[in-house]
Amino acid sequence: MPDALEVVDLRKSFAAPNGERIEVLRGLTFTVNAGECVAITGPSGSGKSTLLHLVGGLDTADHGSLTTFRREEIGFVFQFHYLLPDLSALENVALPLLIRRRGVAYQTARHLLDSSGLGDRLDHPVSHLSGGEQQRVAVARALITKPRLVLADEPTGNLDPSIGEEIGKSLLSYVRAHSRIALIATHSPALAELCDRVLVLEGGRLSA
């Protein structure tokens, strides 16, 4: 199993309406080691989400190489929660394990939600939860399979600073406690400051 994320000369372009190619990523090279959390910052439209999609296997690069993780080894956290509104918080978090027919799904989900401060909200439909509570559910769902790689795309973008910091710390705690890898795209200086390193993506290139 890979113990580091290695990205070498990664390139990605898209076709503009006029037929021209727009280079979004222009040869990115970096490494994230196990137990390390790296923030990717940069202006809107700089390609942060594109980078996460390539690393997570949701899109294909034009050129370059990167460490390949199995789908079940990756946990995704998005700015918009993508929770199932008709299910409870407990059911949403347990779902990834239920799909794999693991009998400990609800027990594990309950533990994660308890540790997230949502022990009294287990049976509430997620549509009845606040934005911060929904994002905590989304983080718990991403971590329930104990992924080796966590990819978070603006995970605190719609939250007030205190809730955002809490969620950032929970991701960092998971990475460090289990020697995992996290790549977090964010506009938040506070969240970036919590991470081990910050890489700035601008003009299709990365700088430290």
Image (cartoon, helix red, strand yellow):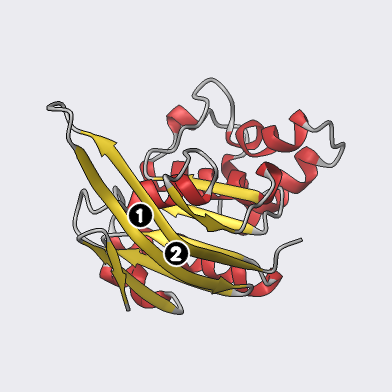
Q: Quadrant of residue 109?
A: top right
Q: Does residue 111 appear anywhere in the picture?
A: yes
The quarter of the image holding the C terminus is bottom left
Along the viewing direction, whichever of 146 and 122 lies nearer the viewer:
146
Is residue 82 rendered to the left or right of residue 87?
left
Farthest residue, direction top: 86
Q: Which mark is residue 156?
A: 1
Tag 2 secondary structure:
helix
What x and y, as percent, mark residue 201?
28, 64
Q: Nearer the viewer, residue 2 or 14?
A: 14
Question: Dividing the picture into quarters, in which one does residue 141 lie?
Answer: top right
Q: Position of residue 189 (x, y in %)?
A: 27, 70
Mark 1 secondary-structure assignment: loop
Q: Residues within 10 Å of mark 2 (few under 14, many from 20)?
A: many
Examine the rendering and report whether any part of residue 174 can be seen: no
Q: Residue at x 69, y 50 (%)?
A: 73
User: Which x, y percent locates residue 17?
Assistant: 15, 26
| Circle 1 crowding by C-alpha within 10 Å: few under 14, some 14–19, many from 20 | many
User: Counting residues from the N terminus, which is met first, the one under dot 1 or under dot 2?
Assistant: 1
Residue at 71% in and 54% down: 146
Q: Mark 2 sits on what residue?
A: 168
| Residue 164 picture location, percent across and down | 36, 60
The amino acid at mark 1 is Thr
Question: Which quadrant does the N terminus fall into?
Answer: bottom right
Q: Are marks 1 and 2 in contact (CB under 8 Å)?
A: yes
